[in-house]
Amino acid sequence: MKRTTRLFSLLITAAMLLNMAACANKPSEAASSAAPQSGSAAEAASQESGSDYSSWPEKDVTIIYYTKAGSGGDIFLRQLAAALNGKLNGHNLLIENIVDPTGATAWGKVQKASPDGYTLACLSSTVVTADLIGGSPVKYEDFDYVTGMGMDPQYIYCKSDAPYNNLQELVDYCKTNPGKVGWATAAPTSASTICSVAIINQAEIDVNRVVYETGSDSLVGVLGGFVDVAVGEYGDMAAQVDAGELKLLCLLSEERNALDIPTSGEQGFDFIFERPRGIAAPKGTDPALVKRMAEVFAQAYDSAEFMAYLESVAIDPVLQSGEEFLASYRTIAGTVTDNMAALTGQQQ
Amino acid sequence: MQLFIQGLGQAFQPVSMLYILAGVIWGIIGGAIPGISASVAMSLLLPFTYGMDPLYSLPMLAAVYVGAEYGGSIPAILIKTPGTGAAAATVLDGYEMNRKGLGGKALCMSLYAGVLGGLISIFILVFTVIPLSQFALKFGPTEYFWMAIMGLSVVGAVSGNSPMKGFISAVFGLFLAVIGMDSFTAVKRFTFGINRLSEGLEMIPVLVGMFAVSEVLRQIFGGEVFESVKNKFKMTYPTRKEFMQCTPIVIACGAMGSIVGALPGAGATIASWIGYSETKMICKNTETFGTGDIRGVAAPESANNGVPAGGLIPLLALGIPGSNSTAILMAGFTIAGISCGPMLFVNEPEIPYKLMACMFVAQIILAAVGLLILKPLIKLTSVSKVYLTSAILVFAFVGAFATLNDVFASWMVLLFGFIGFLMKRYGFAPPAAVLGFVLGELVENNMRRALQLSHGSMSVFFSSTIDWVLIVLTIFGVCFPYITKFISKKRAERTAAKEA
Amino acid sequence: MKNFMNRERIIALVCLAFAAYIWIVAGTFPASFLDSVGPAKYPRLLASLIGITAVILFATSNGPVKPIKGKREFRSLAYILLCIMIYLLIFTRIGFILSTIAFLLALTLYFDHRELKTRLKIAVPYAVCFSVFLYFFFAKLLGVLLPSIVL
């Protein structure tokens, strides 16, 4: 009896070792979307040398993201994976969540990965803010940007009974009531804070800035009447706007979108905050490969479900090339550096 | 109300119950694994809901939430490892009961408290969802601040023999919450240049380290692990008297849990501590809390099981997800194409009530499943100490790893395990530190925010009725044991004088 | 004078030193006009609370202090701390399953005092099965990125 137990455990160990050797390099796929898939075995892909990448992808592509499964950005990626189902030569888009609020671990991993087009990052504006404000070791410039896949614009909002209806009236009100208007902002590295600070500086108004932890918390602050104005994403406030509790004062961009709210651009504020989210590759990836990847990802826009999803969470469908994507992030960087002192409450 | 009954009829269908059962089981498993919290367990199920009929996907997700809040107490009681943050308070008395061989009793009471507390909270939800949501909006920074202080006021109860060292432990915990980037000024505080720390310490590694790993280290240092005597398998159940004693506590804490759950800034963790602390203050003869008093298990467990239903309130009525778990539920709604918020009650009111009905069913199924697994669980942990201890350690490190997908979390577990070990050895109170850590962010951020709103004036902390209610409750809670002692002493003196 | 420094007083001094450390480091935080409190006041408040309590503790702990009862297995403690540190270091290098098997064996074989043969008979299958079970449960089912063999 002793010998059989021994033999049994040896066999199990051997089987496991073999299994692990076969699984080396294969990230866990339990995180992939529910899209039905022909299970791709871990084929050792032969690298495409030369500039013809029309057969990309030849194996599963991994996109790494920095927030956990179920978060907004993660759902976006899963929708993307579902939309690209069948367009990846029978392979999958795998999503890896390496949770780190500054993004450093997740994006750092992509930066160090081999530029063969199979390890990519999904970026959000956090990559810029964590770099410039948070001192993250991951520099936002150190990627080869592939494509921007949607804009998450910011809106200024307030309670519907407030005595102002657009940005200009708000500014005028603030000027006649210095220090009285409560303006909620979220954490220093968030888009809402950066936008708020930029507007407050440009308009040269004196408001009482109140800091909350997240956009959702500032929404609660506005609803409860503790603060007057806040900046956030439409998805957070849609329910309240529909119910008539909140009103949108302004869209922080150049042109109007489907919601037809006056924009900061048309009201004379030289302030653009384009906040795209998109895909980037490790630096040094062959530009021809980058182009091919952008073409493949753009096919997600052919999917009606994907477009419907974008509409449901109020992401503006804007496809950008790699250069345009990087340029957007550079404008964010510019806004941040211009307003760095005010962001952190230092004396200018 | 009739919509709720209608919903119940639908929820009790066999197919629907199957989905809820699956959700409850998955929730218990997820909650029981330290590192997998309720929200992570729910998010793991989310991709599967894409193709599902929302009739079943939403109840399933809600059932996971319900199951997970109970599941967290299982390892808390059995191996001093809270499976979810909200089970930390359960460790205090639950593990002590297990050490005395009363683990079955503790688990059973935890189940009873959880289910009953959950049912109470659902009733509250059904009858008061809209007014309660408006009430929740009235909670501003000062209210949250006082609520956190109320939770902290139990520090005396968890301090053990030295109140001063307990106090230092709690302040140490508050300090741990400071580590990271300041939300207000982006200044990095006490991060030692480690980028991973710039968002602060993660809760699970600290909890698991301070509780489970420090206990393992203590056992090893004290030579307990060398005992080769196998633990006898003993199954105990609560007595009828204990049930009756705990029921009023459960009802009160369950109700309180649903109110706390309805507040967007507070969650199950805070609810469980407030439940523990208020029960300890208000009930009689609570000196035994912390040494294995069964009421110390009933109170936090009913509080944290009352939270899921409460969390539905801002989600459904206002469209605001108050916690990570409700955010996942909201994602489930979005995937199903339903938008939450005030218009939901106007346009499609049967949907929210149906969800409440499904939560009701989930609680019942939880009771059934929980009873089934009671004995096997106790049996599982009566193996030889060496094997149990090594398994706990691996579980702790892997679970922590799971929170971040980075081994850094596991190093944190080791560090806090060692710190907790030193603290226990020299008379300090790791539970107090955990309490301070968990509540620290609420305390500091709301204090500063309140001062921002009031332009620096301190009177804002005493400005609203809710503030005063909380302050009075806190002071009353702290003083009550002294008052009762004083009264009974006077009474004894008077009787002695009469007899003289 | 021999009784001046006892264990409790040393503990109080350590706490006081810790409070001083917090106080000093908090002084390096830049002030801000954004909120009247600033990033330094609250940590300093905590530091003073600890400091004052530590002083009280120091003052009230005169007289003999009871020694801590119980065994002190320093070697076992050192051994397990070492094992854990090695485990975490090799975790990412040789993968989850192998390092966990090694760790479990290191613990169970050291602490179990029965005969070597009986120990191995139970420890090896336990280590292997538990590690494999955890791997499949966490990596496959839950999607946690446990490292497999990195060669």
Image: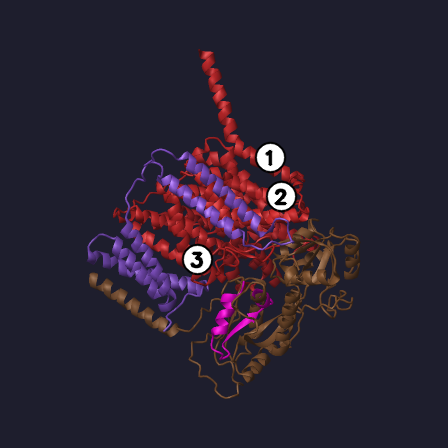
Chain colours: A brown, B red, C purple
Please provide percent x and percent y for residue A226: 69, 49
Disc 3 secondary structure class: helix
| Vertical arrangement, residue B440 with respect to residue B41, above or below | above
Per the rendering, the mark at residue B251 is: none
Q: CA distance from mark 3 to mark 1?
A: 39 Å
Q: Amino acid at mark 2?
A: Glu
Q: Amino acid at mark 1?
A: Val
Asked if disc 3 and disc 2 are in contact, CB closer than 8 Å, the reply is no
Query: Which region of the structure is painted magenta?
Result: A102-130
| Residue annotated with mark 2 | B143
User: Which is nearer the eye, B353 or A85?
Assistant: A85
Q: Which residue is mark 1?
A: B472
* Residue A137, image x, y percentages: 51, 67
User: Which residue lies at the image location 27% right of the left edge and 58% below the top edge?
Assistant: C123
Q: Are marks 3 and 1 in contact (CB under 8 Å)?
A: no
Residue with the mark numbered 3: B400
Count the marks: how many?
A: 3
Is residue B296 visible in the rendered image? The answer is no
